[in-house]
Amino acid sequence: MSIYNPGCGEITPPICQDCPSKELGRVRHFWLQKSTYTFTDITDPNEWATAICNEDVYVFPYANGTIDMAELLSDGYGNVPQTLDSYEFTANLHEPQYKNNIAFWNDIKRSNQYLFGYCTQTLGHLSDVAAMFFPKAPVSADVKAKIDLNITVKFVQEDLIEPFVFPTSIFDVCLSCA
């Protein structure tokens, strides 16, 4: 199957390193960011603290999960059968604050005003568009299994997410604004 990319504009040259560093997986932390809020310097922990205390950003330092990306294709033209239009991102997250965060997630599921950000080992990633949030609290038949909030997050955007080095101190503990 051939995929057509019209190639409009300049191509960023790839980087080749003999000993590249590895980035390890798992969504380790995540955050929700008001779509009307923009960081001046997303790597500045003081700016994060201000955004959190102003409720422009909600941080979940204790989480785990995965991210999947599916290609969204459309019919091509001429001899090209399909073109790549965008990606559908799906995050499957586990958040341990079951009882305490039910009201929050009930409000967020009705909102379409939040970008979704997540952290892997050392890198942060933030969506370009608002996401949809689908919280669930499944209960297992296992009498020893704890109940976590399971949140599915979905959004569609044209490009892959450009990673950045996030301020780790923001995700080390729950931040108190009092």
Image (cartoon, grey):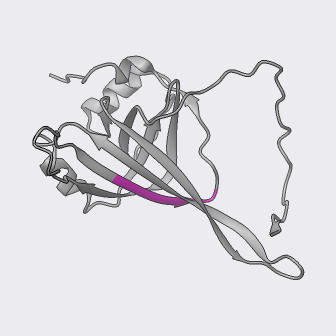
Q: Position of residue 155 (x, y in %)?
A: 47, 59
In magenta stretch: residue 26:
no
Nearer the observer, 139 or 37:
139
Q: Is residue 157 left or right of residue 18?
A: left
Q: Position of residue 7 (x, y in %)?
A: 85, 60
Residue extending furthest toward the front: 142
User: Which x, y percent locates residue 111?
Assistant: 29, 60
Residue 157 in which image quadrant: bottom right
Q: Image point 24% across, 24% down: which residue? A: 174
Direction from residue 9 to residue 162 in the image, left or right: left
Tell me: 128 left or right of 77.
Answer: left
Q: How many marks on residues?
A: 0
Q: Where does the N terminus fall, quadrant-wise?
A: bottom right
The reply to whether residue 34 is in sight is no
Q: Which residues are magenta?
A: 152-158
The C terminus, quarter of image: top left
Q: Is residue 44 above or below residue 42?
A: above
Q: Quadrant of residue 133?
A: bottom left
Position above or below: 94 against 74: above
In the foreground, 18 or 141: 141
Question: How far across and how far down the image is residue 39, in percent?
Answer: 46, 35
- Whether the magenta-drawn stretch holds residue 156 is answered as yes
Residue furthest right in the image: 79
Q: Is residue 178 left or right of residue 136?
A: left
Residue 25 appears in view: yes
Name above or below for residue 176 compared with residue 116. above
Task: Using the image, determine if residue 147 lies above or below residue 23.
Answer: below
- Examine the image and state in which quarter residue 66 appears: top left
- Identify the residue at horizontal 43%, vertical 50% (top origin): 91
Which secondary structure is most common in the magenta stretch?
A: strand
